[in-house]
Image (tube, rainbow, N blue to C red):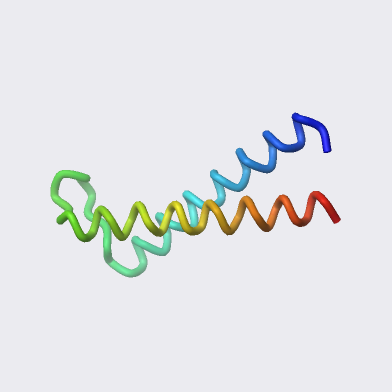
Amino acid sequence: MAAFDILMVVALGTLAGTILGLVIGFLARRQQPIWGEMTQKERIINIALVLFFSIICTAGLAWYALV
C-alpha cells in the first residue's frame, strides 16, 4: 500500500466520519446552531460521535483497501 493510498484512506475516513457524526448528532437533536449555545454535555457527545464514526469509517476503508 503506497503512502498516497494511506493518506486517501485517512482523509476520506475522517471526512465520512465527520459527516456521519454531525448528521446523527443533528438527528438526535444534540446540536445547536451556535457552538457557544451548547452545553458541555452536548459538546462532548458531538465530539465523541465525530471521533467514533471517523475511526469506524477509516477502519472500514482501510480494510476495503487491503482486501
Name which residue lies at 43% across and 53% down: 50
Q: Nearer the viewer, residue 30 or 65?
A: 65
Residue 67 falls left or right of residue 24: right
Count of numbered circles on the image? 0
Quarter where residue 44 is shown = bottom left
Residue reaching furthest top?
Answer: 3
On the image, the x and y values in percent for residue 4 come to 75, 30
Quarter where residue 60 is shown = bottom right
Name which residue lies at 13% across and 49% down: 37
Name which residue lies at 38% across and 57% down: 48
Q: Nearer the viewer, residue 67 or 22?
A: 67
On the image, the x and y values in percent for residue 7 come to 68, 34
On the image, the x and y values in percent for residue 58 come to 62, 50
Q: Is residue 13 above or below residue 41?
A: above
Residue 38 falls left or right of residue 46: left
On the image, the x and y values in percent for residue 1 come to 83, 38
Name which residue lies at 63% across and 41% down: 10
Residue 62 falls left or right of residue 15: right
Q: Is residue 36 above or below residue 48?
A: above
Residue reaching furthest bottom?
Answer: 28
Quarter where residue 30 is shown = bottom left
Quadrant that contains the C terminus: bottom right
